[in-house]
Image: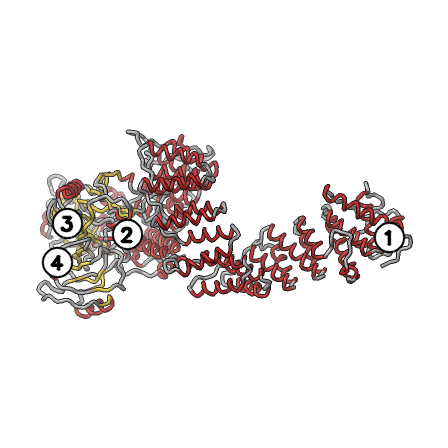
């Protein structure tokens, strides 16, 4: 709860708690100096404040408070109370956007990450360079920067298994010397207390007592913390921080440059009230062309060189400038130091909305002023054309826009805009909003568009932040474009030309481009490039970039057709670079990916190596290799890496054990996996729900449901609460074990338990429960579950509604299943899969709507590829069986023809379904139903079988033995013409050659002839249709009996009557 004091002499009084809206209304009307001061990103503190007043923020949460929190106004006595337990006191100047605050951090290294300080400090030297080491406030030890983070402007992300999420140092005040916060873990105490990268350390606690002493070096802070830890009974260290945004919010930038001008100069000067000499006019007819081209009205002359020597002497009056100039003869040059004010516009403090960010209209308003200022600076100082000017103006006189303060401010604002919306995207990611990636990509697009409009090159920090934004948005191709545009080198690490360098255009001027600058290439931008290749799954390019960074093409083990290029700057990849490529190779999987990862792993130095030219393996390196072998199904190799890590003196962490457990249980060694769980407990490593779920999943997969249930109980007794994934694994395990009723009981038990009710509000769990109801044939229960999930705000997915369709069909409720299908088809998403269409075909068939069922299959044949080949075949089989059972021979004929024309070959199930639909048995026995059946229907069934035989013959496909047997038996039952045709079928199967006349009849065409006509056709030696029937040993006896029956009958029947 922020507190503030109205004035130093106010009486002690406390006002009641009020809302933030009322707080703002009260002071905006009372005093214009009160203003809402907050940053557009949670990395900066915000509150309502007044100049030189103090504001206290309780509960240690500085940077992430929202305006809907409650505020209370207290007096100065309360505001100046002593610190305790992480209380933060702020001294804020809203006009200059600065804040000073104090926080207390623990002086011990905790075992759990959630309780660690999670902060490192870094020294800034006199020349602006930063130290190569940082001070870890958890261990009070120095750590190499290369072993800590990947970029000075890296966005939050995790690279490889086990990487810490780190926020790296931001822009600090120019010309600062001292100690700054370099990195902050987002789940550490420092971050939760409001500490952010870039904050300046002003003072720390003394060895004894509560007094704070100024600190400006890392060693001073380390000494104070170490001595306090030993000598003081206090376990906390109070630190005073300062944060400033004054440099980024300035509306003007003062540029300084020098130039030499020959007499006569031809400029008018006047004194200003602040002791400056201002150029009030330039005489075009008297001044040299250098003065006219390089100077403008409003510039300030701050120094002039002396008549003796080359030193520049400060001047504060027109008289001093005149004295220096008149001491020179006409034609002699005089050197001046000039200051020029560049207007860069106001920097908006309020945060633009997401709609404004992704709008396609223009660049972000926050960058317009700086872009215009840079363009104005670049347009001044036109290069002289005459030889006189060329000789009179020295090269140093030109004011280069690149590298100027205006350029640096433009890039700083670009980074601030990126960080602002990165923080916004992180909030959306936590809320599960799909627009988070769009925010990241659009922000980077706008920043690059603004820089293209300004024709301003990128520096390394800005480029790294842009590329990381693209990779976080899952758009690696745009990261490659940004790299090639900014650096001018090929993003694949080869010596090829950068083909993407002209892809970025200005938003206002499409002809504007970003000039390439090799200064943007450093370890951090190269690391971002590696990350983009890893995201893209391009291991060869990642290895090529790594070799180009090292300047060692021999280290590239890819294809020799495109070797690595020699970059003009040799970089020295750190362990993070190697881990990125290692994780990418491991993620690629397969034998090639694992071998590539192993090769890179073996190239790295062992932890006990004293000095090496390559990075030393760390915990992340070993964990990545264990995970790679686990994914590749090589548990023994994973075990080898695990034990080599122990021998190297690196203690395995939770991720090490989890990866190894996964390797064992997926190989079937569940006993070994559970043994590792016990070993983790012995080593005081807490197993999380993810680790338990791996073993539970393996048990359920092998139908060991009781063991899975016992392990889940053991997990709860160990203090690890199951999550929705745990319940999902157990419920699916029960379904696979054929226990749908127990699956529903488990779901309802979790639903009725207040502790786990929220876990059941999950679409996957509801879908599994509906599938269980479907297996039980309880469609009413399935409908009730769908209604319940909609009531709690869980939207059913296609898979959920598919399970509901299955439940309806299991209860012979085809109409309800069709209603669900139409609901899926008419939804906004309109996402249907093969299973939905298969169930829809079944529902339409059961309803008797064969036209709709056939239409679905026709659409799938004509290009809609939602159904797989197996699903399509099963649906056709279902349609054949159902339509033939309903004696709808027209649909059956057209569908069978369509199946063959689509290139599909009927299966054994197809022919079996046809016979079942026709009601034809593989036996000659007749029952009462067969004796009294409709003879016309019987003949249509026989004719359909002949149609099937003819259709197969036209496709040069063999006739199935079951179909052949069914034709013979059915012909024997019907008698007459069809019995005669059956006898010729038998002869056609056993005939060795069919070669009488070129004209051949189809078998179905013979049914239109009388028996005598059929005999005449045969006697005229017109060839019968060919017939090939492969018969296996199991069916051979039945086939011979059927052929013998029709042959005998044909010999005895001398004058058959036509039927």
Q: Which mark is residue 80?
A: 4
Q: Closer to the camera, 605 or 959?
A: 959
Q: Residues within 10 Å of mark 3 (few under 14, many from 20)?
A: many
Instruction: Tell me where residue 914 sits by quadrant.
Output: bottom right
Chain-order first, disc 2 or disc 4: 4
Dot 1: element: helix
Chain-order first, disc 1 or disc 2: 2
What residue sits right under mark 1 in the picture? 1014
Dot 4: element: loop
- Between the residue at mark 1 and the residue at mark 4, the CA separation in whole angstroms equals 117 Å
Chain-order first, disc 3 or disc 4: 4
- Between the residue at mark 1 and the residue at mark 2, the CA separation in whole angstroms equals 96 Å
What residue sits right under mark 2 in the picture? 410
Residue contact at pointers 1 and 4, CB within 8 angstroms = no
Q: Closer to the camera, 661 or 363?
A: 661
Residue at left offset 41%, top offset 58%: 750
Q: Position of residue 593 (x, y in %)?
A: 45, 37
Q: Residues within 10 Å of mark 1 (few under 14, many from 20)?
A: some
Q: Is residue 870 left or right of residue 940?
A: left
- Between the residue at mark 3 and the residue at mark 1, the CA separation in whole angstroms equals 121 Å
Dot 2: element: helix
3 vs 1, front mark: 1
- Between the residue at mark 3 and the residue at mark 2, the CA separation in whole angstroms equals 25 Å
Q: Which mark is residue 302?
A: 3
Chain-order first, disc 3 or disc 2: 3
Q: Is residue 799 left or right of residue 1030?
A: left
Q: Position of residue 552 (x, y in %)?
A: 37, 31
Residue contact at pointers 3 and 2, CB within 8 angstroms = no
Residue at left offset 46%, top offset 41%: 666
Q: Residues within 10 Å of mark 4 (few under 14, many from 20)?
A: some
């Amino acid at each position: 709860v922020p507190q503030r004091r109205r004035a130093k002499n106010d009486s002690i009084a406390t006002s009641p708690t009020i809302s933030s809206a009322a707080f703002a209304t009260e002071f905006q009307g009372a005093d214009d100096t009160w203003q809402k001061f907050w940053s557009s990103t949670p990395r900066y503190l915000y509150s309502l404040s007044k100049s030189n007043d103090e504001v206290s923020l309780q509960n240690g949460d500085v940077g992430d408070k929202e305006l809907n929190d409650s505020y209370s106004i207290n007096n100065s006595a309360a505001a100046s109370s002593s610190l305790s337990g992480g209380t933060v006191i702020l001294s804020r100047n809203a006009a200059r956007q600065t804040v000073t605050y104090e926080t207390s951090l623990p002086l011990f290294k905790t075992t759990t990450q959630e309780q660690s300080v999670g902060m490192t400090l870094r020294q800034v030297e006199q020349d602006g360079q930063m130290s190569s080491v940082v001070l870890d406030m958890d261990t009070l030890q120095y750590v190499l920067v290369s072993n800590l983070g990947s970029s000075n402007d890296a966005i939050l992300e995790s690279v490889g298994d086990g990487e810490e999420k780190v926020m790296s140092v931001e822009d600090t005040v120019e010309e600062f010397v001292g100690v700054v916060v370099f990195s902050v873990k987002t789940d550490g105490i420092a971050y939760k207390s409001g500490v952010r990268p870039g904050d300046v350390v002003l003072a720390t606690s003394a060895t004894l007592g509560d007094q704070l002493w100024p600190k400006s070096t890392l060693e001073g802070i380390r000494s104070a913390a170490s001595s306090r830890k030993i000598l003081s009974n206090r376990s906390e260290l109070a630190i005073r921080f300062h944060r400033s945004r004054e440099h980024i919010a300035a509306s003007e930038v003062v540029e300084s440059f020098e130039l030499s001008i020959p007499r006569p100069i031809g400029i008018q000067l006047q004194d200003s009230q602040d002791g400056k000499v201002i150029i009030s006019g330039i005489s075009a007819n008297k001044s040299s062309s250098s003065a006219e081209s390089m100077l403008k009205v409003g510039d300030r002359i701050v120094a002039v060189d002396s008549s003796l020597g080359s030193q520049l002497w400060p001047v504060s009056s027109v008289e001093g400038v005149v004295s220096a100039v008149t001491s020179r003869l006409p034609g002699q040059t005089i050197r001046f130091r000039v200051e020029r004010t560049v207007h860069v516009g106001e920097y908006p403090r309020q945060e633009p909305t997401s709609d404004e960010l992704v709008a396609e209209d223009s660049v972000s308003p926050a960058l317009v002023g700086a872009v215009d200022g840079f363009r104005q600076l670049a347009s001044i100082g036109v290069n002289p054309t005459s030889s006189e000017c060329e000789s009179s103006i020295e090269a140093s006189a030109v004011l280069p826009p690149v590298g100027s303060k205006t350029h640096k401010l433009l890039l700083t604002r670009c980074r601030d805009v990126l960080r602002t919306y990165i923080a916004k995207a992180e909030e959306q990611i936590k809320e599960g909003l799909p627009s988070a990636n769009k925010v990241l990509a659009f922000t980077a697009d706008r920043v690059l568009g603004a820089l293209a409009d300004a024709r301003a090159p990128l520096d390394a920090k800005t480029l790294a932040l842009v590329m990381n934004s693209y990779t976080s948005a899952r758009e690696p191709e745009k990261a490659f474009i940004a790299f090639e545009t900014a650096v001018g080198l090929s993003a694949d690490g080869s010596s090829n030309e950068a083909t993407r360098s002209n892809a970025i255009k200005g938003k206002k001027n499409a002809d504007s481009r970003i000039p390439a600058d090799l200064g943007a290439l450093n370890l951090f931008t190269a690391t971002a490039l590696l990350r983009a290749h890893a995201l893209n799954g391009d291991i060869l390019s990642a290895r090529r970039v790594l070799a180009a960074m090292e300047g060692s093409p021999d280290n590239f083990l890819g294809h020799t057709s495109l070797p690595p290029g020699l970059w003009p700057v040799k970089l020295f990849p750190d362990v993070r670079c190697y881990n990125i490529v290692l994780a990418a190779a491991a993620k690629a999987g397969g034998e090639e990916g694992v071998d590539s990862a192993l090769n890179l792993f073996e190239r790295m130095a062992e932890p006990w190596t004293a000095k090496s030219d390559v990075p030393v393996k760390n915990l992340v390196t070993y964990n990545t290799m264990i995970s790679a072998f686990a994914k590749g199904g090589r548990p023994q190799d994973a075990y080898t890496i695990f034990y080599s890590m122990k021998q190297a003196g690196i203690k395995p962490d939770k991720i090490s054990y989890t990866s190894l457990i996964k390797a064992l249980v997926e190989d079937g060694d569940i006993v070994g996996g559970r043994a590792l769980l016990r070993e983790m407990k012995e080593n005081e490593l807490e197993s999380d729900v993810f680790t338990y779920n791996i073993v539970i999943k393996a048990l359920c997969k092998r139908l060991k449901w009781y063991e899975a249930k016992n392990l889940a109980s053991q997990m709860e007794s160990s203090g690890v609460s199951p999550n929705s994934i745990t319940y999902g694994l157990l419920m699916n395990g029960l379904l696979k074990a054929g226990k749908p009723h127990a699956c529903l009981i488990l779901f309802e038990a979790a639903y009725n338990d207040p502790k786990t009710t929220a876990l059941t509000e999950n679409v996957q769990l509801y879908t599994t429960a509906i599938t269980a109801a479907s297996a039980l044939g309880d469609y009413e229960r399935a409908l009730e579950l769908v209604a319940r999930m909609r009531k709690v705000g869980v939207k059913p997915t296609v898979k959920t509604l598919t399970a509901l369709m299955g439940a309806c069909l299991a209860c012979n409720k085809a109409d309800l299943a069709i209603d669900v299908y139409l609901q899926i088809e008419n939804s906004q998403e309109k996402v249907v899969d093969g299973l939905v269409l298969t169930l829809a075909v079944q529902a339409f068939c059961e309803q008797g709507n064969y036209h709709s069922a056939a239409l679905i299959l026709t659409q799938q044949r004509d290009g809609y590829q939602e159904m797989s080949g197996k699903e399509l075949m099963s649906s056709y089989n279902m349609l054949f069986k159902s339509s033939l059972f309903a004696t709808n021979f027209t649909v059956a004929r057209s569908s069978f023809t369509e199946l063959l024309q689509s290139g599909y070959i009927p299966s054994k199930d197809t022919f079996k379904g046809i016979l079942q639909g026709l009601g034809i048995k593989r036996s000659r026995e007749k029952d009462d139903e067969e004796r009294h059946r409709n003879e016309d229907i019987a003949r249509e069934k026989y004719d359909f079988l002949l149609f099937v035989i003819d259709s197969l013959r036209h496709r040069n496909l063999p006739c199935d033995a079951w179909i052949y047997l069914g034709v013979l038996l059915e012909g024997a039952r019907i008698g007459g013409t069809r019995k005669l045709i059956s006898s010729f079928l038998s002869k056609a199967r056993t005939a060795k050659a069919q070669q009488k006349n070129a004209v051949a009849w189809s078998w179905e065409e013979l049914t239109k002839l009388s028996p005598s006509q059929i005999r005449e056709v045969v006697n005229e030696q017109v060839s019968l249709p060919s017939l090939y029937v492969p018969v296996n040993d199991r069916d051979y006896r039945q086939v011979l009996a059927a052929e013998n029956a029709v042959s005998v009958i044909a010999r005895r029947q001398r004058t058959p009557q036509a039927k």
